[in-house]
Each structure stands twice: as C-alpha cells, then as structure tokens.
Amino acid sequence: MTVTRRLVLAGGVLLPAGWGAFAQGSEALVACPAGRFIGKRIDGIASFSGIRYGRAPRFLAPIATPPAKETVRALEYGPVCPQASNRRPQSEDCLVLNVWTPDARRGARLPVMVYIHGGGYAFGSGGDAITDGRHLARRDVVVVTLNHRLNALGYLYLARLSSRFPDSGNAGQLDLVLALRWVRDNIAAFGGDPARIMAFGDSGGGGKVTTLLAMPAADGLIHRAATISGQQVTASGPLHATRRAEAYLARLKTDASGAASLPVERLIEALDTADPISGGPIYMGPVLDQRALARHPFWPDAPSQSLRIPMLSGNTRDEMRAFSDPDSDFVRTMDWNNLAPRIAAELPVDVAPEHIVGEYRRRLPAADAAEIYFRATTAGRSWRGQLEVAEARARAGAPLWLYQVDFTSRADPWRGAFHCIDVPLVFGTIDAPGAGAGNDQIVRAVSGALQDRFVAFAQTGDPAVPGADRWPNYDLTRRDTLIVDVRSRVAADPRKWERELFAKAPYLQPGT
C-alpha cells in the first residue's frame, strides 16, 4: 500500500507533513539562494547555527561560499577565528554566521539585527552565551551573529611590504561586508526584511560598525547602525600599520610571504609583540589603505555614505571599572601621588593629568583617588570617542540618538555601570554566565525597556516607544541624552564639565 504524505510550507519550501518545523524541540528547514539549511526550533524560535558565508585565504580578501548542493544541518556554532583566548573550536575557516527567527516564512519581512562582536580586533565570538539571539528574536526581529577574521589574520597590514597581500590590513572588515551581503541576499527566506538591516556591535564591534559606515563596499548594506561602548574615529595610518607589521614579522623571524605559510599557532603566539608606536600590546585594526578604506571613519567629519543611515550610540557611566578588580594591587594602591600618571597612561588626549586630577577633586571633593581614576579615564577615553562620532553626525544634520547607562550592576555593585553592561540588557541574556548585571525583577525591567528602544529602532529607524519619554536627536545645542536607569530619563548635556575638560585637546583613537 502506498501512503502519500501531506506537505506543509515552512521557510519558503515544502516539507513532509509530520516534520514539525514549528513544534517545540523540532527541526526547521529553510531554502534560500545559499542553499537548504536545517535548524532547530525551541520555544517558538528557530535557530540556524554555523552557516558558512565565505572562505578566508590567509591575508587575502574573503571569497563567497558557493550555494550548498546538499542540505546543511546548521545545528552547532562554527569555529571562531584563532585567538589568544579559551574559546573553542578555533580555525582559520571561521567565516560562519548564526540566525534566530520567530517566523521563518517568506514575506514575513521582520527587521534584521546583525550583531558584530566585541573583543577589540583581537578576540571574540558571535556564539557567546551573552549574545544568544533567541531572547531578542522573541521581540519579532530576526537576529544574526557572526564570526570573522581577527588580529593578524584580519588586520595585519602587509600591502607596503608585499604586492601579494593588498587587502590584508582590512581583511576582517571585508569579511563583515561579505557577511552583510549574505544577509541581504538570503535573509528573506528566514522571515527577515533585506531593506531593514541594522548593524550593531559592542566595544570593538562598535568600532567595526563605524568603520563599515565609511567603507564604499558596505554602502547600501546597512539601513540602521548602533554602537554600544565602542566606535572608530580614526583608523591606523599606513605608515604606522607598516611599522607594526615589520615588528610583528621580526618577532616571527620571517617576511610577509613566510608568514602566509606558517602554522597559525605561531601567528597567535607572536601577538605578544610590543607595539612600536605605543609601547603596549601590538595593535591591529582597520587601516587607511586607500583601497577598502579611503578615509578615516569619523574624522574630520562623518562619511557622506553614512548620513542617510539613522544611528544609535551608547556608553556606560563606569566603563573602565570593567577592567579592574577592587581587590587588585592596582586599585588598592591608588592614591593622590600616583593618580595623575595612571590617568595619563590611559588617555588618548593630551591634557595635563595634574590639571585633570585638580579639576575632579574640585568638582568631587568627597571622591577618593580610585573613584576619580575611573571617572576620568571613562570620560577621556571611552566617552570622548563616542562624542566625536555624535558631534560629527550633529554637524552634518544626520540623525543620531545618544544614550548613557547609569544602571548599576545588581550582581556586583562595585563595578557600577561597567563597560558593555548593556549587551546582556539588549539581548535579554541577563541569566547567562558572566552577564554581570544581575537577574532580579528590576534588572528584567531595565532590560525590557532597553530592548523596546533597540527593537523600535530596528523596526523604524527611530527609538521612540509609546508611553516612554520623548528622546530627541543629539544636537550641539541641547545634547539630549537618554540616561538608562531603573527610571530612565532624558538629560540635556549630562557631565557637561567633563565633556568640556577633555574637549580642550584633539582626540586620537587609542592604538592607531
């Protein structure tokens, strides 16, 4: 006896009845130009992990992955770029992305939020628990996270040393462009709207987003942009980047061609090379190579291709507390004698540190040395770069909404509103290990309110939320800023005196 099985529609393709593409714990199938992908569906969200979007020949521009001929089981995260961290697995074959969707139907046309991970340009992953996209996808958005090349594999500038590697200094950025093209071409099959793609990133990921806004190859691929505690005002110049490459190759005891064939472990070990420009750990990030990147991202002005893209930008009140421990010798030994040189070591602005200490002591007479250190370094290093981007946008009349997180960690009050506390708040992953914000009802309420703003921005290009305070664009007159807290509010020119203190000297992007 022959049994004919009824077919049901899922993800734009016909599936056998009983596949259960939308049942809890079942598999889901999507067909798109890149191929057919099997994912898993849990609690109403379908996830597809480890989808390859390209190949990464060492020190060269990426190559798009051809459409898969066989159905791909996209059930596990792919490898991360080799890096000096405990993330595993690691592989140079790391150009993979992940998709979460609440509605894998063609024609759903949900806004798409493409997250670009932090970790500077040296380490990180699009598959960490804190950036699991399933919670955010429940807000009727499609979420994409991805891996790309980092450190020497993504940003070692060899173009002036060998004609073989013209794109080496921005290979990691070109990976991101390729990933965004994949999203544009395929996301409709996952229920996403290719005309509403929001790129957002934290820390170094914010720097990658702002750099993309100045790259002609990314023009038209991003329709909203958001940065979380990170931006790129200036890129590394080609001469500085070449000096860094020479120092790095000297550490490897080889030349550019030799580095292309060394075991990748050797490349990662050599990342402890001292930076010949700063003297600290060697910096590798976007390069003004006049090829992929022909201008600085946000200096001397905002790039013209970015002006039509609405932008959301945030930082936290206590950024620098994330990088210290209250019981460390560094914090315990902080006093009025060593405060000024310690502040000077962190600042990318040439303002006399003694003057900075004096002004903070005058304004905050009850503060101890450690508190002033964290306030001053946060304002002069982290916040100042964000203001450079905001002011450049304001001068051009381009829309930007600025926010500052004052919400203090409920799990570790000493860290306050630490660097990237808003990442688990935006993703709704406050229960994830290492999230650090706490997970009581107050934290959940703050997370929900911030998610409302980000999702509204992804949907419309404006973070306005019914019933919430009106949040105006940032301008150079009022400088309206949303203060994110238990009770969020809009403040005009918060921390004005700190802004004016550090505006007395030009800003240089740290590391460049």
Image (cartoon, rainbow, N blue to C red):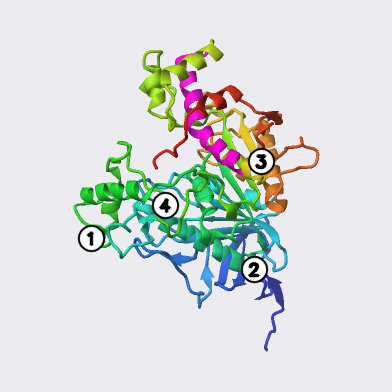
Disc 3 residue type (three-letter): Trp
Compare marks 3 and 2 and give the one earlier in the sequence.
2
Residue at (29%, 50%) from the top-left corner? 245
- Residue under label 4: 288
Highlighted magenta segment, given as a residue range? 366-393
Compare marks 2 and 4 and give the one earlier in the sequence.
2
- Residue under label 2: 189
In terms of secondary structure, what is the magenta stretch mainly? helix
Q: Quadrant of the N terminus?
A: bottom right
Mark nearest the camera among 2 and 1 is: 1
Can residue 421 be seen by looking at this rendering? no
Disc 2 residue type (three-letter): Ala
Compare marks 4 and 1 and give the one earlier in the sequence.
1
Taking depth in this image into account, of 326 and 249 the one nearest to the observer is 249
- Residue under label 1: 258
- Residue under label 3: 401
Looking at the picture, does residue 488 appear above or below residue 457? above
Q: Which residue is most to the bottom?
A: 1
